[in-house]
Image: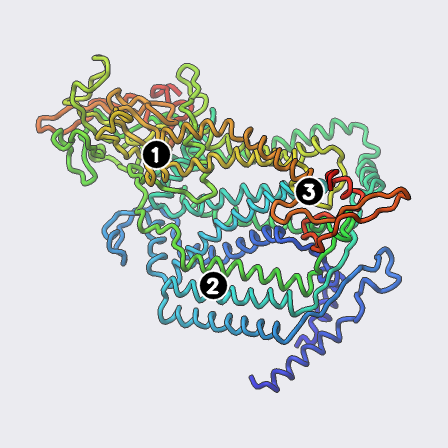
């Protein structure tokens, strides 16, 4: 029997000093630091539920006829893949719960990554020394989007089939090599290439999850090497990190977040319906449905494809670029390209390649923040355009009118957003007032002897964690003259 | 578990753990080189109320998890399963968070960061690498040759990827339609002129051929003959105003399945086929020309003729290549 686990392990692996260091590892506290953790925990839920699903799924387009319990589909010819998902959803105990939880977890996973990214961008956490980890995180976002799309496609219902047809078209539309590449990826034409189902199954359950797991490990390894950034605050400097040690406080809270994430996902999976595939029916290329919506993280691409004008450059009878390429591939490539280059762009603007451990608040760097708002607007407009069909069917606004509005907005929206955001951030910067909490601080005046006297009353409330504690001279300089 | 037994076990575990933990922070031990004494604020917040709250949450977590097991066996209803499992996990989360914030010692520690980027050590790394090339006269050439070999091996490793799929050639231009092939509906029954009503549409397939190919499905509509706005030369293959188009959108491969007819005058005066995916809108009177939306090409048309019993028969191949655009889509067959 192992009497003393600490001794048992240490005498064999010599890890006590490492464990000691780990237990005292310091985490700075801020709510926004939980976003990345939520993504991590959603990934764990995805792996757990995914294993269950993989064991119930049949990756095959072999045709079969449904004879299961769901009356409306009985006698319908369909693929083995689709049939296995319908059976899993309707006949396997807890099958639907796990499938829906998996689907919700995918949506939450990507949402948490995106919010985490936005936090990183606006606070300047991507700056030296964290550029490499930022690039790894960004790569994970791209992989996660692809992974989500593939998972959704595996089902071979009408909606996912339409999604695959569009993806196939975007591949075909790629200049010069498009058609050859598409046939390589799909193993022939879509629909029809049988080998394709084994391929996306392998990629979805093995290759991309392994890639994600590897990137996550790397991300966290670098994180522990560099420690978290922190917002400015009492005792916090560029050379230290102030916060809660891992054991016991932080470990319990973070484990709590793991279970909270999992709990919420299972509640969603049990109580809020998502993608009721038995209603869509099997994919047939000659069918399509109106007002179909993909998962949220593909909305920007669907919207982008919609607002693109009918441009298809041709030389003689050779088509240079198929239309679907522009917004289905070029747009996300440019968007990710901008994000990859962001640390370099920011370095140009902000100068000085020094190490940054204290975060900016968005107002601290109005130019960066305004540029980010402009960029996010540029990405968000096609995303909203993805909902035009909903507006059309619900409110009756003609779609061509809406599309024209979005086409214009896509071009001018970012500029307008930049102008407005720049003003707001500069204003916040100058007044240093929180829009909701108001100004807190104390007004001091420098006297003839070089000391400081307090003029205005300090309102007694401390700054939130996000507030900077500045030395008094700075505060005095920031206060408008009439104070 | 009786109270005594529990107390005994807890005490054993506690003493065992406590014996292992030194009283002072290990890092504070004087004399450890390079480690400044960390600045730790410590507070012991635990109260009977907080501990009771944790216990209650743990009890709830246990109960809900047990309920999940029972439900799974007896009544596997998705909602109840999700509710019990989710509740159990959330209750456990509450217990952990309350314990983490209100029961265990609350500490704020300051940790100094290590320095990154020591210039001297970088120089040492460079020197070691450099010394690895000592005594070699043709260094450049060797490096170049190794690079060339590496790149070529990499390329060789990638080449077999070309076996993953067929070459394009004419594949994307071949459709199952042949002159003389009848148009049938989803049940295999031949479509006749009489089946096609003005304002409605039918989906047709080549008789006896595969249906789940992008080249197969056609959407068949009908106009009054004087509504057709095409020069005489292009009117062939529209007998009695019956017109067949490829049902696959030339934009991104969705099925064009909306027929905008009856007409909403004056805003939408023309009968049009609309793709629900990205709203490419094709003018039926002008042979499928684009009215609105992203498609770069018109909707390909399949010329028809009418058989002796009124059945619709293909009278040639599509006027353009069907399906989404690719580099060779505007070329004739055999031209790649
Ligand atoms: S697929 Fe028809 S408009 Fe895009």
Question: In this orientation, does residue B38 appear?
Answer: yes
Q: Residue at x 47, y 24 (%)?
A: A176
Point out residue B198 in the picture as x, y percentages from the top left corner: 17, 29
Q: Nearer the viewer, residue B316 or B238?
A: B238
The chain under label 1 reads A
In three-dimensional space, the C-alpha distance between marks 2 and 3, rounded to whole angstroms, equals: 42 Å
Mark 3 vs mark 1, CA separation in Å: 43 Å
Instruction: Identify residue for label 1.
Output: A397
Label 2: how many residues lie within 10 Å, few (<14), some (14-19) or many (20+)?
Answer: many
Q: Does the beta carbon of the residue at mark 3 sit less than 8 Å from ligand 1?
A: no
Query: Disc 2 vs disc 1: Cβ atoms closer than 8 Å?
Result: no
Q: What kind of element bears circle 2? A: helix
Dot 2 and dot 3 residues touching (CB under 8 Å) = no
Q: Which residue is mark 2?
A: B86
Q: Which residue is mark 3?
A: A432
Tell me which chain the residue with mark 2 is part of. Answer: B
**The N terminus of chain A: image quadrant:** bottom right
At x 72%, y 46%, the residue is A358
Viewer-nearest of discs 3 and 1: 3
């Amino acid at each position: 029997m192992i009497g003393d686990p600490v001794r048992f392990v240490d005498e064999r692996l010599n890890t006590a000093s490492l464990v000691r260091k780990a237990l005292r590892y310091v985490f700075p506290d801020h709510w926004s630091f939980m976003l990345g953790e939520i993504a991590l925990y959603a990934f764990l839920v995805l792996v757990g539920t995914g294993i269950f699903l993989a064991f119930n799924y049949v990756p095959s387009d072999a045709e079969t006829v449904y004879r299961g319990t769901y009356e409306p589909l009985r006698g319908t010819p369909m693929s083995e893949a689709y049939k296995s998902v319908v059976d899993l959803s309707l006949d396997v105990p807890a099958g639907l719960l796990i499938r829906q939880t998996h689907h919700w977890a995918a949506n939450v996973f990507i949402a948490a990554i995106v919010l985490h990214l936005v936090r990183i961008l606006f606070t300047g956490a991507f700056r030296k020394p964290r550029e490499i980890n930022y690039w790894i995180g960004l790569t994970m976002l791209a992989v996660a989007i692809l992974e989500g799309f593939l998972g959704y496609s595996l089902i071979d219902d009408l909606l996912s089939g339409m999604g695959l047809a569009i993806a196939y078209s975007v591949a075909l539309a790629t200049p010069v090599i498009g058609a050859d590449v598409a046939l390589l990826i799909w193993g022939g034409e879509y629909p029809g290439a049988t080998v394709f189902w084994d391929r996306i199954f392998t990629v979805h359950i093995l290759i991309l999850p392994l890639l994600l797991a590897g990137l996550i490990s790397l991300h966290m390894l670098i994180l522990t090497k560099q420690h978290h950034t922190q917002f400015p605050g009492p005792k916090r400097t560029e050379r230290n990190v102030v916060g809660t040690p891992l054991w016991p406080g932080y470990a319990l809270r973070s484990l709590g977040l793991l279970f909270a994430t999992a709990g919420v996902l299972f509640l969603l999976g049990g109580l809020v319906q998502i993608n009721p595939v038995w209603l869509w029916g099997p994919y047939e290329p000659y069918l399509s449905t109106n007002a179909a919506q993909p998962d949220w993280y593909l909305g920007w691409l669907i919207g982008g494809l919609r607002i693109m004008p009918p441009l298809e450059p041709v030389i003689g009878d050779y088509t240079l670029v198929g239309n679907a390429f522009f917004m289905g591939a070029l747009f996300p490539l440019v968007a990710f390209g901008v994000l990859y280059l962001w640390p370099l762009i920011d370095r140009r603007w902000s100068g000085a390649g020094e190490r940054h451990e204290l975060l900016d608040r968005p107002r601290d760097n109005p130019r960066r923040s305004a540029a980010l708002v402009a960029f996010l607007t540029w990405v968000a407009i096609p995303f909203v355009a993805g909902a035009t069909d909903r507006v059309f069917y619900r409110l009756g606004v003609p779609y061509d009118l809406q599309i024209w509005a979005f086409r214009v907005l896509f071009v001018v929206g970012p500029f307008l957003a930049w102008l407005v955001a720049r003003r707001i951030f500069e204003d916040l910067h100058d007044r240093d007032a929180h829009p909701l909490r108001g100004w807190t601080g104390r007004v001091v005046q420098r006297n003839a002897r070089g000391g400081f006297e307090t003029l205005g009353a300090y309102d007694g409330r401390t700054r939130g964690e996000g507030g900077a504690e500045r030395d008094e001279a700075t505060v005095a300089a920031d206060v408008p003259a009439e104070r | 578990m009786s109270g005594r037994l529990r107390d005994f076990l807890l005490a054993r575990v506690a003493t065992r753990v406590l014996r292992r933990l030194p009283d002072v922070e290990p890092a504070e031990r004087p004399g450890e080189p390079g480690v400044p004494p960390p600045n730790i604020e410590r507070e012991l917040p635990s109260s009977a109320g907080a501990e009771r709250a944790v216990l209650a949450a743990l009890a709830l977590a246990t109960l809900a998890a047990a309920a999940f097991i029972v439900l799974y066996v007896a009544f596997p209803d998705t909602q109840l399963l999700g509710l019990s499992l989710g509740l159990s996990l959330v209750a456990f989360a509450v217990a952990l968070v309350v314990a983490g914030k209100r029961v265990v010692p609350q500490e704020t520690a300051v940790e100094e960061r290590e320095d990154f980027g020591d210039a001297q050590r970088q120089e040492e790394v460079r020197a070691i690498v450099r010394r690895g090339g000592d005594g070699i006269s043709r260094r450049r050439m060797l490096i170049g040759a190794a690079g060339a070999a590496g790149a070529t091996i990499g390329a060789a490793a990638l080449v077999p990827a070309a076996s993953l799929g067929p070459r394009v050639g004419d594949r994307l231009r071949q459709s199952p339609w042949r002159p003389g092939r009848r148009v049938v509906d989803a049940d295999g029954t031949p479509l006749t002129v009489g089946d096609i009503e003005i304002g409605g549409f039918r989906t047709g397939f080549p008789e006896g051929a595969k249906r789940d190919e992008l080249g197969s499905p056609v959407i068949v509509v009908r106009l009054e003959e004087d509504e057709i706005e095409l020069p005489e030369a292009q009117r062939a293959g529209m007998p009695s105003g019956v017109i067949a188009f490829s049902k696959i959108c030339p934009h991104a491969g969705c099925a064009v399945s909306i027929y905008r007819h009856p007409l909403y005058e004056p805003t939408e005066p023309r009968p049009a086929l609309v793709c629900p995916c990205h709203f490419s809108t094709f003018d039926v009177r002008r042979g499928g020309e684009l009215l609105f939306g992203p498609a770069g090409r018109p909707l390909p048309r399949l010329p028809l003729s009418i058989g002796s019993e009124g059945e619709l028969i293909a009278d040639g191949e599509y006027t353009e290549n069907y399906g989404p655009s690719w580099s060779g889509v505007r070329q004739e067959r055999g031209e790649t």
